[in-house]
Image (spheres, coloured by chain):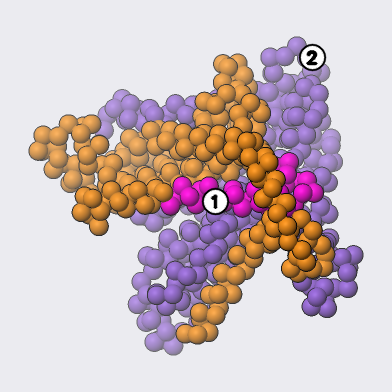
């Protein structure tokens, strides 16, 4: 295919991609205090200096890493186990185990709301435990929501991401030949051996992919933590929001600097992702 | 077998439980700790919905419109490139494909703020087209993926055959390729629609309050103390995409049956 012809046929994608690239460039430029406004900044690195002197930012950074990592790992593991369980069910009844899909259509802000009403000190789970005699009263129930320890955000992403992992894992499990499992069983492999020695290696590429997607998403997303609203140390996206909307315009470069760092960090991960995707064969790539 | 059916019921129940809680809250504004089931039921949530009908409808209508437009726009953006990625081999294909998928992977905030800066300069900020554009920017990768898989699902022979019989390029696209791609278009379009419909921040950033949205309408309620209204509206939120998917499914099935395919 000729180069010009190729560019012409990809043109309808190149245009939005240029907008994306321009968006990134303007974010980067503004982070170096090139804002087109009349403010005078002491140095182009003004925003980055503020950030790295600010312990809050460093704490937010590690907090976001922790929340994103924990939720992505937990959702990938739970999604894999549940998919495997559903897949092992007899074919006729398999399709009835599909209620997890509710959370595919549920928007992030609604998932966050559900976490508040389920896990709050006077929430539904606390009520159930009270009646079961396990918790004496709301004050004895652990602080899961609005306490700043990130457990509420992790729980929210966990719930929202399980069905996503399951979609990906089902996609690849449908390519797994059931006769392979039967053969392994006949040769004396137990359930655990089959799962860890046969199934997990087979679906591993998809697990890597899903982990990276979920990790980056929860690392930089805004909607869910905004509803849950933990302020300290809080997710990075909430820091961005604060600097972008709630402070003087003068501090906007600080928001842009955080976003630039998030962007560069994500690029690092996307590079890893595309390498993994490149290794998968054509028909296995579902996402 | 009985044990398995029981375990499926338990599995489904766990995921349905949150919906059940929303349902109880919708019909009881007096649900207090430690009642597992509300002591009194009332119609506060329903009354709120009827009273606020105008605002709710405006939000839903606007959200559906910009999400549908975004899904349609992603189709226009990706249909020809997807056929290239599915059929042609050229140097740096994977790199290019990975690059084009980046907007769905990289946290949207990081480029959306830059895009907002551009939109302000060119007058697209606070407008409906601006919102559609930013939403298609984050959702086109899903459409690209779905269409590429769709093109890979059938061989190039159909196209060659039609071409040999004298069909032009446009004719082939409309009469052969798009009908064969319908399942892929629906799955890609559903994801693109859902991404756009559930988004709160981007619509808030680019729409700036002048483009109404259901998420924007819902948000203040979710953090308010009126759980009855918040739960009712969250349930309504789920109904919209479900209805839409039911309609498209029914419509597609009917048109397939008419042609005698199914």
Q: Verify whether residue B238 appears in magenta.
A: yes
Percent coordinates x, y for residue A239 in the rendering: 76, 38
- Which chain is the one coloured purple? A
Q: Name the foreground residue: B93 vs B196.
A: B196
Q: Which mark is residue B239?
A: 1
Magenta residues, start to end: B219-246
User: Same chain for the residues at labels 1 and 2, yes or no?
Assistant: no
In this picture, residue B231 sits left or right of residue B86:
right
Q: Which residue bears the numbered disc 2?
A: A40
Q: Which quarter of the picture shows residue A123? A: bottom right
Q: Which numbered marker is on residue B98? A: none
Q: Position of residue B198 (x, y in %)?
A: 58, 44
On what subunit does the disc labeled 2 rest?
A
Residue at horizontal 14%, vertical 37%? B163
Q: Quadrant of the N terminus of chain A?
A: top left
User: From where the camera sits, is residue B98 visible?
Assistant: no
Q: Residue at x 76, y 46 (%)?
A: B223
Q: Chain of mark 1?
A: B
How far is mark 1 from mark 2, CA to CA? 51 Å
Quick check: A131 above or below A223?
below
Magenta stretch: includes residue B245: yes
Residue A12 at least partly seen:
yes
**As drawn, is B124 to the left or to the right of A261?**
left
Label 1 SS = helix
Colour of chain B, in one word, is: orange
| Quadrant housing residue B175 | top left
């Amino acid at each position: 295919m000729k180069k010009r012809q190729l560019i012409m046929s990809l043109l309808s994608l190149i245009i939005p991609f240029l907008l994306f690239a321009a968006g990134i460039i303007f974010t980067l430029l503004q982070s170096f205090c090139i804002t087109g406004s009349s403010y005078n900044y002491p140095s182009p690195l003004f925003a980055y200096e503020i950030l790295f002197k600010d312990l809050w930012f460093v704490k937010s950074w590690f907090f976001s890493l922790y929340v994103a990592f924990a939720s992505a790992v937990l959702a990938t593991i739970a999604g894999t186990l549940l998919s495997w369980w559903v897949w092992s069910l007899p074919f006729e009844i398999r399709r009835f185990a599909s209620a997890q899909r509710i959370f595919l259509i549920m928007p992030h802000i609604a998932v966050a709301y559900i976490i508040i009403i389920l896990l709050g000190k006077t929430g539904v789970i606390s009520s159930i435990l009270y009646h079961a005699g396990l918790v004496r009263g709301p004050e004895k129930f652990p602080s899961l929501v609005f306490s700043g320890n990130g457990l509420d955000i992790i729980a929210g992403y966990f719930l929202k991401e399980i069905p996503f992992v399951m979609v990906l894992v089902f996609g690849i499990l449908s390519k797994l030949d059931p006769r392979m499992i039967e053969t392994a069983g006949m040769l004396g492999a137990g359930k655990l051996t089959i799962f860890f020695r046969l199934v997990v290696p087979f679906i591993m590429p998809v697990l890597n992919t899903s982990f990276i997607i979920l990790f980056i998403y929860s690392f930089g997303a805004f909607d869910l933590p905004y509803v849950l609203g933990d302020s300290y140390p809080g997710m990075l996206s909430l820091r961005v929001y604060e600097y972008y909307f709630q402070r003087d315009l003068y501090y906007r470069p600080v928001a842009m600097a955080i976003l630039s760092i998030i962007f560069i960090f994500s690029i690092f991960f996307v590079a890893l992702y595309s390498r993994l995707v490149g290794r998968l064969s054509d028909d296995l790539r579902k996402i | 077998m009985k044990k398995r059916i029981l375990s499926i019921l338990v599995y489904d129940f766990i995921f349905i439980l949150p919906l059940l809680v929303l349902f109880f809250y919708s019909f009881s504004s007096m649900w207090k700790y430690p009642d597992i089931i509300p002591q009194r039921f009332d119609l506060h949530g329903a009354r709120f919905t009827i009273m606020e009908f105008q605002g709710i409808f405006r939000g839903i209508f606007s959200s559906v419109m910009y999400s549908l437009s975004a899904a349609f726009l992603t189709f226009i953006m990706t249909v020809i490139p997807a056929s290239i990625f599915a059929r042609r081999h050229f140097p740096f294909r994977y790199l290019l494909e990975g690059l084009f998928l980046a907007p769905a992977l990289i946290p949207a905030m990081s480029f959306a703020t830059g895009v907002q800066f551009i939109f302000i300069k060119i007058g697209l900020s606070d407008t409906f087209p601006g919102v559609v554009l930013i939403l298609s920017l984050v959702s086109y990768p899903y459409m690209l993926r779905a269409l590429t898989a769709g093109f890979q699902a059938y061989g190039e022979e159909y196209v060659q055959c039609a071409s040999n019989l004298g069909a032009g390029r446009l004719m082939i696209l409309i009469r052969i390729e798009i009908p064969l791609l319908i399942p892929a278009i629906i799955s890609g379009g559903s994801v693109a629609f859902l991404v756009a419909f559930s988004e709160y921040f981007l619509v808030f950033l680019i729409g700036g309050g002048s483009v109404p949205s259901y998420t924007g309408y819902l948000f203040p309620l979710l953090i308010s103390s009126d759980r009855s209204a918040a739960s009712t509206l969250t349930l309504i939120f789920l109904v919209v995409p479900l209805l839409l998917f039911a309609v498209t499914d029914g419509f597609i099935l009917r048109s397939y049956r008419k042609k005698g395919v199914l």
